[in-house]
Amino acid sequence: MQGTSFIGYSRGAVNAPLTHAVNPATQEKIEPGYASPSNDEVERAVQLAHAAFPQYRLSSAATRAAFLRLIATEIEAVADDIAARGCAETGLPEARLRGETGRTVGQLRLFASMLDDGSWLDARIEHAQPDRTPIPKVDLRSMMRPLGPVAVFCASNFPLAYSVAGGDTASALAVGCPVIVKAHSSHPGTAEIVASAVIRAAQASGMPEGVFSVLYGSGVTVGGALVKHPHIKAVGFTGSFKGGRALMDMAAARHEPIPVYAEMSSINPVVMLPGVLAEKSVALAEGFFQSLTLGVGQFCTNPGLVLLPAGSEKEFIASLSEKIAQAPAGVMLNAGICQAYQQSTAATAAQAGVTAIVSQLPAAPGTGLPQVFVVPAKTFLEQPALCEEMFGPASLLVVGSEAELLAVAESLEGQLTASVHGTDAELATASTLLEILERKAGRLIFNGFPTGVEVCHSMVHGGPYPSTSDGRSTSVGTMAATRFTRAVSWQNTPDALLPDELKESNPLGIPRMVDGKRC
Amino acid sequence: MQGTSFIGYSRGAVNAPLTHAVNPATQEKIEPGYASPSNDEVERAVQLAHAAFPQYRLSSAATRAAFLRLIATEIEAVADDIAARGCAETGLPEARLRGETGRTVGQLRLFASMLDDGSWLDARIEHAQPDRTPIPKVDLRSMMRPLGPVAVFCASNFPLAYSVAGGDTASALAVGCPVIVKAHSSHPGTAEIVASAVIRAAQASGMPEGVFSVLYGSGVTVGGALVKHPHIKAVGFTGSFKGGRALMDMAAARHEPIPVYAEMSSINPVVMLPGVLAEKSVALAEGFFQSLTLGVGQFCTNPGLVLLPAGSEKEFIASLSEKIAQAPAGVMLNAGICQAYQQSTAATAAQAGVTAIVSQLPAAPGTGLPQVFVVPAKTFLEQPALCEEMFGPASLLVVGSEAELLAVAESLEGQLTASVHGTDAELATASTLLEILERKAGRLIFNGFPTGVEVCHSMVHGGPYPSTSDGRSTSVGTMAATRFTRAVSWQNTPDALLPDELKESNPLGIPRMVDGKRC
C-alpha cells in the first residue's frame, strides 16, 4: 500500500498532508495515509485519458470484453485483502464485503457479455436507393460510439460495486471510454487494492496508458477539477443530493456542458393497502423491518416513507414497534454519515405532528439505531421538509384516508423506487395509485421491498429528479451502456472503412436493424 | 385566420399589441396580426398539458399511431393553403414548401410505423428464479415511458418539418408526451394553418384536451415561461447558438433541471483529399456550389468550411469562383437572418489573412449573395473566431499542408456533419483524419455534401456541443424517440397490471429481450 494516486501506469507523489481512513467501529486511524494529487498530477491523468481515447474507443468489442473479464479475475485474486481492508474501513461485515466483491465482478462480466452480444450498439443499416425519385436515397448506417473520458466518483456506501471498479466504471470502460476515478475518503485502501487489480489487468491487456486512473484527494478540489476539465466528457456519481447537484451545476456551467449521471437521494415510498394489512400485518412489519435495517439502512433504496390507510395501520405499527424496540444499533459507514443521520432524524422528530413509534435512547458513538416516526397525512402534506431523506435506518409512516394518501403520492418528487403491497383484488382496482407511482419512480415493486437491486438487463436504478440528476438513465444493469455513448451515422461509406459492426457481411454476427427490420 | 394562440381546444384572446409576419421578398406586412398570450393563457396551456399527461401517456401505441396518421391527413388537406401562406412568409419557393409538407407528413407516418413496430420501446423481460441461491431472483420487466409535457420551439428555416407539426412534435406525441409549441414570429400564419390541422385531428381522435397547444409571442417571455414551468419536462429547439444556450442555462438552473435538445450551429467541415481534386475539381466545385446555395444556404447542414490541401486547391477554387461570380442573390428568410448574414460575412472578411475568392457588390435588401473566403491553415488555427457559423450561403476555404489540415480538423468543436472526398486509395490511408472527424461529428459523409437529411431509422442529425446541446441525441429520424422517454422497471408485477407490451403472452407481438435474448 503506497497511499498515492494512480496516474495512468505510474503513481503520484507523496504530497503532504496525508489523510487517513478511520475505522468506524473503533475510531482508529488506518495506515497508510493518502496523498492528494497535485494540480499537475490531475492534469496528467486527464491528458493521458484524452490521449488514450482515440485508440481505446476503436478497440474491438472482444478486446474490451477480455479486458473487463481480466479485471474481474484480478479482483477475485485479491478478495481476501479486499474483505480485510474493506471491513476495517467501512464497518460493514465480512459477508457483505465478499458479497459485494461478487456483485462487482459479476457486473464486469455482465458488461463483457453485453459486448459479446452487440445488441446494445443499436446497429442500423439502410441501403441506398439510387433510383428513388425525386431524390436518390443514400446508404446510411448508425451505431453507438463512446463520448470520451469519464470521471467516476466512488460511493461511500458501496466500497466495491459503486466505487473504483463498480458499475459506472464497468459501463464506461465497456463502451470505450477511459475512466478517471475519484476515490472516496472513507475507503482509500480498498480503492488502492482494487485500483492495483485494474491496472494489472490494463497492462496485461496492452491497454493504452491513461485508459484508467484513480485520484485521491478532496471531492471539491480534485473532483471539481475533473468535472470542469474540457477533456472530461461525462460524469458518474453516487452520493448525496448536495454533492450531486453541485456537480450538475458545475457541468452545466462549462463552456461545453456535459452529462452528469448522479444517483442522489430517494425516500422510496411503500404503500400498504387495507386488504393486505388485514391479511398479514405482522409479516409485512417483519419484511419492512428487514428492508429498513439491512446494511444499517445505508442504501439508496432504503424504504424511508410508508403510506398506511387510516383504520388499518394499528397492527402493523404495533408489530413494527416491538421489533424497533429490540433492534440493536449498527456501526455506520463514517462519522459524517452518522452525524447526518442523528441530525436528520432529530429534525423529523422535531416537526409538529410527528411522533416516534418507539422512543430511542442515544446510540453509542459511530452507531445508528432504527427510528420510525408516524405522522397524519394532512400534516405531511403541509410540511415539505418531511420529504427529505434520512440516510440510515429511519422511516416515516404516513397515515390517512385513501384520498389523502393519493394526494401524498402525487406530492412526491422523483424516486428510485415505489412499492405497493396489496391483495390481487385491491391491486386490480388501484389504477389511480399505480399511475401516480409509475410517474414518480424508476422501478415499481409489487408486494416487495425496495432494497436488493438485481444487476441485469431490465433493471432501472434511476428515476426522476431529485432521485437522480437524469431520470433517462440507470446506474445498475446493462441499460447503463447508453449513458456514455452517442449514435453516429456513416453515409455512403466504403465497406472497408466501416466499423466491423456495420459492414455489409456482418462479420461479428450481431443483431442489427436492416432497412427497418430487426435481424 | 384568427391570429391567436391555441390553448388546448380553445383560442386565446386578441391581446394588443399584435405582431405581423413580413413578406421577406416585398417587406410587406401580412395580415392578420398575431396576439401574444397572456401569462394566464400560458399557464392554462401548461395546466392542460399536465392534466392530459396521465391519460395520454397510457394511451395505446395504436391510438397514438392513428392520431399521428390523422394529423398527416389533415395537413395534406390544407397543403395549398400552406404553400401559399408559407411562400409569402418565408420567401421560399412553392416547390420547397410543398416538398417540406411532404417531408412533414412523411415524418409523422414514420413515427406511426415506429409505434406499430414497437422495437423502440426496448422492452425487456427477465423471469423470476425463486430457487436461485443465495438470493432468489425477482421477475423484472422494463420499457420506455414518456417524460411529460414537452415545449417545442419552431425553427425559422423549416416552417413545416421543424415547426408546429415537425420532427420534435412528432417524436414527442409518438412516445406519449403532450406538446406545447412556441410558434416562430417569421411564419405565424403557416403555424396557424398547421396547428388547426393538428387540433382537428386531436379532436376527431378523442385526445384529451391539452395534448397539443400552440403559443405565439416572444421567445424570451413566452418561451422562457414554458422552459421554467415545473410541469414542462423537456424542450426541443432548432435555432441559433445564442438562443439554444440561453434555454440550456434556463433549464439547468431550474429546481428540477430538464433536458434541452437544442440543434444550434454547425459549420459542417468538408475535407477534399489531393487525389480526388486531381481527378475532378470541376465536378467537386459544382457539387459544393449546389450544396452551399441550396435554400440560400439557410440549412444547419450548410457546408461552411472546406479543407483543401495546398498545391491541389487551384482548379477547385478557380471553378468555384466562376460560379460564385455568376450566382444571383436569394431572398433570405427574414430581416434578422439577412442582417446577421451580412454581419457575419463582413466579420470574416475583416479578419487578417482572409480574402474573398470573388468580390461581391452589396446585395439588394432582404437578399443574400453567396460568399466564399480563403485563408491559410496556419492563420485559421490562430483565429478561433473563424470557426463561427455564417448562417447563409457562405463558406471558408482553409488551405494547408496535410499536417496543418489535420490540426485544423482536431481544433474544431462538435459538428452535425463532417464530409470527406477522396479516391478509394487515399481514403484507405486516411485513418487518422477519419478518426478525428468521427469524434467531432454526428454524421460522417463520404464523397458527398452535407445538405439533404434523410428522415429514417439510421439518421443522426445531432453532434457534440455546440452543434447541439446534447450530442447523445438526434432531431431527425426515429432515434429521436429516446429523447422524450425514460426506462421504467416493473418488479414482480401481476400480469394483468403490466402494460400490454410487457405481458407474458406478448399480445402486441413486439420484439423483446427475454432472459437476455432478443426475440
Image (spheres, coloured by chain):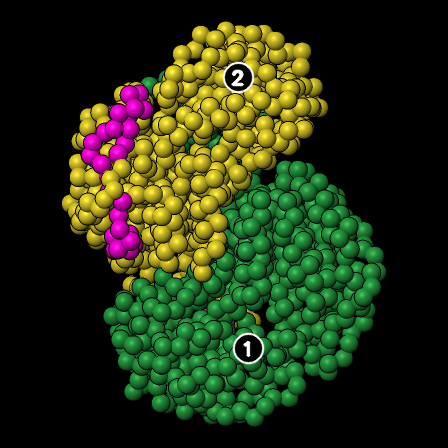
Chain colours: A yellow, B green
Dot 1, crowdedness within 10 Å: few (<14), some or many (≥20)? Answer: many
Residue wearing tag 2: A372
| Contact flag, marks 2 and 1 (Cβ < 8 Å) | no
Which residue is disc 1 drawn over? B392
Q: Which residue does the image show at 41% across and 91% down from the upper left?
A: B318
Q: Quadrant of residue B330?
A: bottom right
Residue furthest toward the front?
A17
Q: Nearer the viewer, residue A276 or B16?
A: B16
Q: Could you tell whether B7 is left or right of B352 in the image?
A: right
Q: Give the x, y percent position of residue A269.
A: 55, 26
Res A199 → quadrant? top left
Quadrant including the N terminus of chain A: top left
Picture residue at 32% right of the left edge, 58% below the top: A499
Mark 1 — on which chain does it sit?
B
Chain of the residue under label 2: A
Residue B502, percent from left and from top: 52, 33
Residue B383 coordinates in the image, percent (x, y): 40, 77
Is A41 one of the magenta-colored residues? yes
Describe the element under mark 2 as helix, strand or loop: strand
Q: How many numbered discs sit on the rendered protein?
A: 2
Instruction: Please tell me whether residue B234 is drawn above or below residue A196 in the rendered image.
Output: below
A146 horizontally vs B55: left or right: left
What's the magenta region? A20-46
Amino acid on which the number 1 mark rests in the picture: Gly
The amino acid type of the residue labelled 2 equals Val
